Every structure is written in C-alpha cells, then in structure tokens.
Image (cartoon, rainbow, N blue to C red):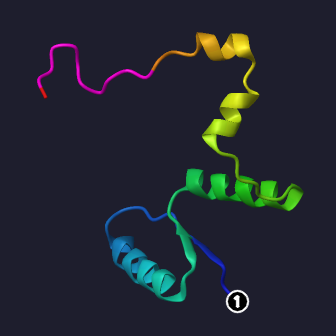
Amino acid sequence: QMQMIINTPTGMMPRRDENLMRTEAVLRQVCMISTITGAQAALGGIKALRNRPLTVTSLQEYATRLKPDRAQTLPQAASSCGAGALI
C-alpha cells in the first residue's frame, strides 16, 4: 500500500505527470512531496515520531517554563503597521 509520494519534477513536460499524480494522491489521501528539502523534513519527522510520541504544548505552557529573567528580555510584539501608517 502506498503511503507517500516523493516526486521532484524538472522542466515543463513532467508537469502533466505531476498533476495526475497529485490528483491521485488527493483522491487516495496520500501525502505528496515535490521537493528534496520537503522529503528530508518528512523523513526527519518520521524518525522523530518513532523515537518519541507526539505531544502538544500550548504557548502559555512554554511561557511559564521560561526563566523569569529571560521572559523579561523578550521583545514586545510590534505592530504590523509602520509608525506613520494610517488605519
């Protein structure tokens, strides 16, 4: 059974094949990766999950784990608008 597709096309001719593969991947609910960097990242994630289970931690939990002196030195969130921007 196919669980993942790794396809790194080059040029315009393989584009048709890629579109067909992507369509099949979506229909069969199979992950499709189209870059070597993406494939390496997926491999790293798979290896990590085999070594330890997936856990979820909220941002608030991470913030409480920070040392008090470190938390005080973190920069404040900046506005996405510039100082002279009108809203």
Residue 34 sits inside the magenta stretch? no
Horizontal and vertical percent position of residue 28: 53, 88
Q: Residue at x 71, y 56 (%)?
A: 45
In the rendered image, the residue lying farthest to the right is: 51
Is 20 positioned to the left or the right of 2 in the image? left
Packing grade of label 1 (10 A; few <14, some 14-19, many >=20) is few
Q: Nearer the viewer, residue 8 or 33?
A: 33
Q: Which residue is mark 1?
A: 1
Horizontal and vertical percent position of residue 46: 75, 61
- Under circle 1, the secondary element is loop
Horizontal and vertical percent position of residue 43: 71, 58
Magenta residues span 77-86
Is 15 positioned to the left or the right of 3 in the image? left
Is residue 62 placed above or below 70 in the rendered structure? below
Quarter of the figure with residue 54: bottom right
Q: Residue at x 76, y 54 (%)?
A: 55
Q: How would you classify the magenta stretch by its main secondary structure?
A: loop
Is 79 positioned to the left or the right of 50 in the image? left
In the picture, which quadrant includes the C terminus?
top left
The amino acid pointed to by label 1 is Gln
Q: Residue at x 15, y 20 (%)?
A: 85
Horizontal and vertical percent position of residue 48: 80, 54
